[in-house]
Image (cartoon, rainbow, N blue to C red):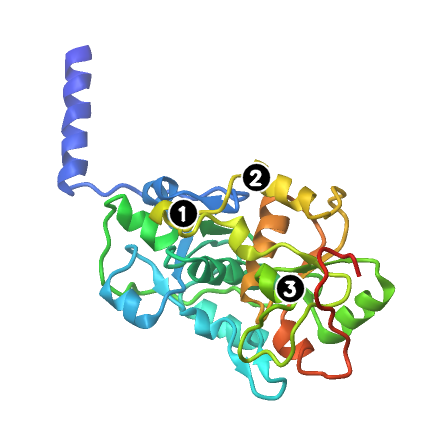
Amino acid sequence: MKRKLLQSVIFILLLVVTGCVSVPATTVTAGTTPLVTTQWLEKNINAKNLVIIDVRTETNYGVGHIPGSFNMPYVGWEPFNEKRQCQLMPKPETLTQMLQAIGVNSSSHVVIYDHGNSIGDATKGAASVWILEAVGKQNVSYLNGGFTKWTFEGRIIDNKKPEAKKGNFKAKVDTSKVASFEYVLDKVKKKDAVILDARSSGQHFGADKRGDVERFGHIPGSISLPAPYLNNAGANRAPATIRSKDQLADMVKGVGIPGDKNKEIIVYCNTGQYAGMGYLVLHDILGYKKVSVYDGSMLEYGADDNLPLVMFTWGGAN
Protein backbone atom coordinates (compact mmCIF):
# COMPACT_ATOMS: atom_id res chain seq x y z
CA MET A 1 0.00 0.00 0.00
CA LYS A 2 2.77 2.43 1.01
CA ARG A 3 4.77 1.43 -2.06
CA LYS A 4 1.83 2.16 -4.39
CA LEU A 5 1.26 5.54 -2.70
CA LEU A 6 4.93 6.45 -3.13
CA GLN A 7 4.82 5.45 -6.78
CA SER A 8 1.75 7.65 -7.32
CA VAL A 9 3.43 10.65 -5.71
CA ILE A 10 6.56 10.20 -7.82
CA PHE A 11 4.43 9.87 -10.97
CA ILE A 12 2.58 13.12 -10.23
CA LEU A 13 5.82 14.98 -9.53
CA LEU A 14 7.24 13.79 -12.83
CA LEU A 15 4.16 15.06 -14.65
CA VAL A 16 4.50 18.47 -13.00
CA VAL A 17 8.21 18.74 -13.79
CA THR A 18 7.70 17.78 -17.43
CA GLY A 19 4.83 20.25 -17.77
CA CYS A 20 2.10 17.68 -18.35
CA VAL A 21 0.22 18.92 -15.31
CA SER A 22 -0.07 22.62 -14.41
CA VAL A 23 0.23 23.87 -10.86
CA PRO A 24 -2.38 26.47 -9.83
CA ALA A 25 -1.00 30.00 -9.27
CA THR A 26 -0.58 30.85 -5.63
CA THR A 27 -2.07 33.89 -3.96
CA VAL A 28 0.16 36.39 -2.17
CA THR A 29 -1.13 37.16 1.30
CA ALA A 30 -1.89 40.78 2.10
CA GLY A 31 0.23 42.69 4.55
CA THR A 32 3.59 41.68 3.13
CA THR A 33 6.74 43.51 4.14
CA PRO A 34 7.54 46.79 2.29
CA LEU A 35 10.90 45.31 1.29
CA VAL A 36 11.00 42.01 -0.59
CA THR A 37 14.11 40.03 -1.44
CA THR A 38 15.10 38.59 -4.79
CA GLN A 39 14.64 35.12 -3.26
CA TRP A 40 11.07 35.95 -2.26
CA LEU A 41 10.23 37.36 -5.69
CA GLU A 42 11.62 34.33 -7.53
CA LYS A 43 9.57 32.03 -5.30
CA ASN A 44 6.34 34.04 -5.76
CA ILE A 45 6.83 35.22 -9.34
CA ASN A 46 3.81 33.29 -10.67
CA ALA A 47 1.39 34.35 -7.94
CA LYS A 48 -1.86 35.29 -9.64
CA ASN A 49 -2.43 38.63 -7.89
CA LEU A 50 1.18 39.81 -8.15
CA VAL A 51 2.01 42.71 -10.50
CA ILE A 52 5.70 43.49 -11.02
CA ILE A 53 6.59 46.96 -12.30
CA ASP A 54 9.97 47.83 -13.84
CA VAL A 55 10.64 51.60 -13.60
CA ARG A 56 13.80 51.52 -15.73
CA THR A 57 13.98 53.03 -19.20
CA GLU A 58 12.17 51.39 -22.09
CA THR A 59 15.55 50.57 -23.66
CA ASN A 60 16.86 48.78 -20.57
CA TYR A 61 13.57 46.92 -20.20
CA GLY A 62 13.74 45.80 -23.83
CA VAL A 63 17.22 44.35 -23.43
CA GLY A 64 16.12 42.18 -20.52
CA HIS A 65 13.85 42.28 -17.49
CA ILE A 66 12.48 40.14 -14.67
CA PRO A 67 10.03 37.68 -16.25
CA GLY A 68 6.42 38.85 -16.17
CA SER A 69 7.25 42.45 -15.28
CA PHE A 70 5.61 45.47 -16.91
CA ASN A 71 7.54 48.59 -17.91
CA MET A 72 6.51 51.99 -16.51
CA PRO A 73 9.61 54.20 -16.86
CA TYR A 74 10.15 56.61 -13.97
CA VAL A 75 9.92 59.64 -16.26
CA GLY A 76 6.16 58.97 -16.41
CA TRP A 77 5.81 58.86 -12.62
CA GLU A 78 7.13 62.42 -12.10
CA PRO A 79 6.70 64.34 -15.39
CA PHE A 80 7.73 67.99 -15.68
CA ASN A 81 4.84 70.36 -15.02
CA GLU A 82 5.18 73.36 -17.34
CA LYS A 83 2.78 75.54 -15.36
CA ARG A 84 4.60 75.12 -12.03
CA GLN A 85 8.03 74.53 -13.59
CA CYS A 86 8.82 71.47 -11.49
CA GLN A 87 8.33 67.71 -11.54
CA LEU A 88 4.99 66.54 -10.14
CA MET A 89 3.18 63.22 -9.90
CA PRO A 90 0.56 62.73 -12.66
CA LYS A 91 -3.12 63.40 -12.17
CA PRO A 92 -5.05 60.49 -10.60
CA GLU A 93 -6.92 59.77 -13.82
CA THR A 94 -3.62 59.44 -15.71
CA LEU A 95 -2.21 57.06 -13.11
CA THR A 96 -5.47 55.10 -13.10
CA GLN A 97 -5.20 54.56 -16.85
CA MET A 98 -1.50 53.60 -16.65
CA LEU A 99 -2.01 51.12 -13.81
CA GLN A 100 -5.20 49.53 -15.11
CA ALA A 101 -3.49 48.95 -18.47
CA ILE A 102 -0.97 46.62 -16.81
CA GLY A 103 -3.60 44.78 -14.79
CA VAL A 104 -3.38 46.45 -11.38
CA ASN A 105 -6.44 45.68 -9.26
CA SER A 106 -7.35 47.02 -5.83
CA SER A 107 -6.35 43.64 -4.39
CA SER A 108 -3.07 43.33 -6.33
CA HIS A 109 0.26 43.06 -4.58
CA VAL A 110 2.53 45.41 -6.55
CA VAL A 111 6.31 44.98 -6.46
CA ILE A 112 8.39 47.86 -7.77
CA TYR A 113 11.95 47.40 -8.98
CA ASP A 114 14.57 49.77 -10.40
CA HIS A 115 18.00 49.25 -11.95
CA GLY A 116 19.48 48.84 -8.48
CA ASN A 117 22.96 50.09 -9.28
CA SER A 118 23.16 53.69 -8.00
CA ILE A 119 21.33 55.92 -5.53
CA GLY A 120 19.69 57.56 -8.54
CA ASP A 121 18.27 54.15 -9.49
CA ALA A 122 17.15 53.30 -5.97
CA THR A 123 15.37 56.61 -5.42
CA LYS A 124 13.34 56.12 -8.60
CA GLY A 125 11.97 52.86 -7.25
CA ALA A 126 11.36 54.32 -3.79
CA ALA A 127 9.59 57.39 -5.18
CA SER A 128 7.36 55.13 -7.29
CA VAL A 129 6.38 53.26 -4.11
CA TRP A 130 5.51 56.58 -2.46
CA ILE A 131 3.40 57.68 -5.46
CA LEU A 132 1.45 54.41 -5.48
CA GLU A 133 0.72 54.72 -1.76
CA ALA A 134 -0.10 58.42 -2.21
CA VAL A 135 -2.90 57.50 -4.63
CA GLY A 136 -4.39 54.88 -2.34
CA LYS A 137 -2.71 51.65 -3.44
CA GLN A 138 -2.21 49.24 -0.58
CA ASN A 139 0.09 46.21 -0.51
CA VAL A 140 3.05 47.73 -2.33
CA SER A 141 6.60 46.41 -1.98
CA TYR A 142 10.07 47.46 -3.08
CA LEU A 143 12.52 44.90 -4.48
CA ASN A 144 15.64 45.42 -2.39
CA GLY A 145 18.66 45.64 -4.69
CA GLY A 146 16.58 45.83 -7.85
CA PHE A 147 17.53 44.42 -11.23
CA THR A 148 21.27 44.51 -10.48
CA LYS A 149 20.93 42.20 -7.48
CA TRP A 150 18.61 39.91 -9.45
CA THR A 151 21.14 39.51 -12.27
CA PHE A 152 24.20 39.35 -9.98
CA GLU A 153 22.62 36.27 -8.42
CA GLY A 154 22.19 34.61 -11.81
CA ARG A 155 18.39 34.67 -11.83
CA ILE A 156 16.46 34.31 -15.07
CA ILE A 157 15.61 37.34 -17.23
CA ASP A 158 13.77 37.60 -20.54
CA ASN A 159 12.65 40.25 -23.04
CA LYS A 160 9.05 39.15 -23.51
CA LYS A 161 6.30 41.73 -22.96
CA PRO A 162 3.54 40.18 -20.86
CA GLU A 163 -0.13 40.67 -21.64
CA ALA A 164 -2.55 41.91 -18.99
CA LYS A 165 -6.27 41.92 -18.42
CA LYS A 166 -7.44 45.45 -17.60
CA GLY A 167 -7.30 46.11 -13.86
CA ASN A 168 -9.85 47.85 -11.65
CA PHE A 169 -7.65 50.01 -9.41
CA LYS A 170 -8.68 53.69 -9.28
CA ALA A 171 -6.16 56.26 -8.09
CA LYS A 172 -7.29 58.85 -5.57
CA VAL A 173 -4.83 61.27 -3.96
CA ASP A 174 -4.28 60.83 -0.24
CA THR A 175 -3.46 64.39 0.82
CA SER A 176 -1.84 63.13 4.03
CA LYS A 177 0.99 61.74 1.87
CA VAL A 178 1.42 64.65 -0.56
CA ALA A 179 2.39 68.08 0.83
CA SER A 180 1.41 71.04 -1.32
CA PHE A 181 3.40 74.27 -1.68
CA GLU A 182 0.91 76.16 0.49
CA TYR A 183 0.87 73.44 3.14
CA VAL A 184 4.66 73.47 3.42
CA LEU A 185 4.71 77.25 3.84
CA ASP A 186 2.14 76.97 6.62
CA LYS A 187 4.11 74.26 8.43
CA VAL A 188 7.37 76.21 8.15
CA LYS A 189 5.63 79.18 9.74
CA LYS A 190 3.97 77.16 12.52
CA LYS A 191 7.07 75.01 13.19
CA ASP A 192 4.91 72.07 14.24
CA ALA A 193 6.25 69.46 11.79
CA VAL A 194 9.66 67.99 11.02
CA ILE A 195 10.88 69.24 7.63
CA LEU A 196 13.43 66.77 6.27
CA ASP A 197 15.90 67.56 3.47
CA ALA A 198 16.86 64.41 1.52
CA ARG A 199 19.35 66.15 -0.78
CA SER A 200 23.12 65.91 -0.43
CA SER A 201 24.76 67.51 2.60
CA GLY A 202 26.48 70.04 0.33
CA GLN A 203 23.18 71.19 -1.12
CA HIS A 204 21.58 71.42 2.31
CA PHE A 205 24.53 73.46 3.64
CA GLY A 206 24.38 75.77 0.63
CA ALA A 207 27.82 74.99 -0.75
CA ASP A 208 26.37 73.73 -4.03
CA LYS A 209 23.06 73.15 -5.78
CA ARG A 210 21.52 71.32 -8.67
CA GLY A 211 21.80 73.26 -11.93
CA ASP A 212 18.09 73.78 -12.51
CA VAL A 213 17.39 74.88 -8.92
CA GLU A 214 17.38 78.67 -8.74
CA ARG A 215 18.98 79.30 -5.33
CA PHE A 216 21.33 77.85 -2.73
CA GLY A 217 20.39 76.72 0.77
CA HIS A 218 17.62 74.87 2.57
CA ILE A 219 14.09 75.51 3.81
CA PRO A 220 14.25 77.16 7.26
CA GLY A 221 14.24 74.68 10.14
CA SER A 222 14.79 71.63 7.96
CA ILE A 223 16.96 68.71 9.06
CA SER A 224 19.47 67.08 6.73
CA LEU A 225 19.30 63.34 6.13
CA PRO A 226 20.65 62.68 2.61
CA ALA A 227 18.95 59.84 0.74
CA PRO A 228 22.32 58.32 -0.31
CA TYR A 229 23.11 57.61 3.37
CA LEU A 230 20.03 55.38 3.61
CA ASN A 231 21.30 53.04 0.93
CA ASN A 232 24.36 50.87 0.27
CA ALA A 233 24.67 51.96 -3.38
CA GLY A 234 28.23 51.87 -4.60
CA ALA A 235 29.68 50.20 -1.49
CA ASN A 236 32.23 47.68 -2.77
CA ARG A 237 30.34 47.62 -6.09
CA ALA A 238 27.38 46.05 -4.33
CA PRO A 239 23.78 46.47 -5.58
CA ALA A 240 21.83 49.41 -4.17
CA THR A 241 20.19 47.81 -1.14
CA ILE A 242 18.49 49.63 1.74
CA ARG A 243 20.49 49.71 4.97
CA SER A 244 19.37 47.58 7.91
CA LYS A 245 16.42 48.73 9.99
CA ASP A 246 18.65 49.20 13.03
CA GLN A 247 21.06 51.41 11.09
CA LEU A 248 18.19 53.46 9.69
CA ALA A 249 16.69 53.95 13.15
CA ASP A 250 20.07 55.10 14.49
CA MET A 251 20.45 57.60 11.65
CA VAL A 252 16.97 59.02 12.16
CA LYS A 253 17.60 59.41 15.88
CA GLY A 254 21.07 60.83 15.25
CA VAL A 255 19.85 63.71 13.07
CA GLY A 256 17.23 64.70 15.62
CA ILE A 257 13.98 63.22 14.34
CA PRO A 258 11.74 62.49 17.37
CA GLY A 259 11.01 58.87 18.26
CA ASP A 260 7.26 59.64 18.42
CA LYS A 261 5.83 57.70 15.46
CA ASN A 262 2.88 60.12 15.30
CA LYS A 263 5.11 63.15 14.67
CA GLU A 264 4.39 64.75 11.32
CA ILE A 265 7.30 64.66 8.86
CA ILE A 266 7.49 66.37 5.45
CA VAL A 267 10.34 65.21 3.19
CA TYR A 268 11.67 67.27 0.30
CA CYS A 269 14.63 67.23 -2.11
CA ASN A 270 15.07 68.86 -5.53
CA THR A 271 12.32 67.09 -7.48
CA GLY A 272 10.54 64.65 -5.13
CA GLN A 273 12.66 61.68 -6.25
CA TYR A 274 15.18 61.51 -3.39
CA ALA A 275 12.41 62.44 -0.96
CA GLY A 276 10.69 59.21 -2.00
CA MET A 277 13.54 57.28 -0.39
CA GLY A 278 13.02 59.23 2.84
CA TYR A 279 9.33 58.36 2.72
CA LEU A 280 9.99 54.66 2.14
CA VAL A 281 12.40 54.49 5.08
CA LEU A 282 10.39 56.58 7.53
CA HIS A 283 6.86 55.45 6.71
CA ASP A 284 7.12 51.93 5.33
CA ILE A 285 10.16 50.60 7.17
CA LEU A 286 10.38 52.53 10.46
CA GLY A 287 6.64 52.99 10.91
CA TYR A 288 6.20 56.77 11.18
CA LYS A 289 2.50 57.29 10.50
CA LYS A 290 2.36 60.90 9.28
CA VAL A 291 4.94 61.18 6.50
CA SER A 292 4.40 63.13 3.30
CA VAL A 293 6.53 64.29 0.38
CA TYR A 294 6.67 67.89 -0.83
CA ASP A 295 6.28 67.04 -4.49
CA GLY A 296 7.39 70.40 -5.92
CA SER A 297 10.45 70.43 -3.64
CA MET A 298 13.33 72.85 -4.31
CA LEU A 299 12.54 73.27 -8.00
CA GLU A 300 9.33 74.99 -6.91
CA TYR A 301 10.31 76.52 -3.55
CA GLY A 302 13.68 77.85 -4.72
CA ALA A 303 12.15 79.64 -7.70
CA ASP A 304 10.31 82.13 -5.47
CA ASP A 305 12.75 84.87 -4.45
CA ASN A 306 10.35 86.03 -1.74
CA LEU A 307 10.75 82.81 0.24
CA PRO A 308 13.59 82.47 2.75
CA LEU A 309 16.40 79.94 2.31
CA VAL A 310 19.08 79.32 4.93
CA MET A 311 22.77 78.76 4.20
CA PHE A 312 25.79 77.57 6.21
CA THR A 313 23.92 75.94 9.10
CA TRP A 314 22.98 72.33 9.90
CA GLY A 315 20.16 70.25 11.27
CA GLY A 316 17.27 72.45 12.31
CA ALA A 317 19.57 74.95 14.02
CA ASN A 318 17.85 77.83 12.30
Q: Does residue 28 appear left or right of residue 1 in this picture? A: right
Place residue 187 in its image quadrant: bottom right
Label 2 belongs to which residue? 247
Cβ–Cβ under 8 Å for marks 2 and 3: no
Single out the residue that lies furthest toward the right: 190
Return the x and y of residue 167 as percentages of the image width and height: 45, 64
Q: Residue at x 78, y 57 (%)?
A: 317
Measure the alpha-carbon separation of dots 1 and 2: 15 Å
Q: Nearer the viewer, mark 2 or mark 3?
A: 3
**56 in relation to 50, above or below:** below
Q: What residue is shown at x 41% (from left), y 58% (from top)? A: 118
Given the image, on which type of amino acid does mark 2 rest? Gln
- Which residue corresponds to mark 1? 235
**Three-letter code for the amino acid on which mark 1 is drawn:** Ala
Which callout, 2 or 3, points at the residue further toward the start of the chain? 3
Q: How many marks?
A: 3
With respect to residue 21, does 7 lie above or below? above
Q: Is residue 135 visible?
A: no
Is 66 drawn above or below residue 47 in the view shown?
Answer: below
Residue denoted by label 3: 204
Disc 2/disc 3 C-alpha distance (Å): 22 Å
**Label 1 or label 2, whichever comes before in sequence order:** 1
Residue 240 lies, in percent from the top left, at 41, 51
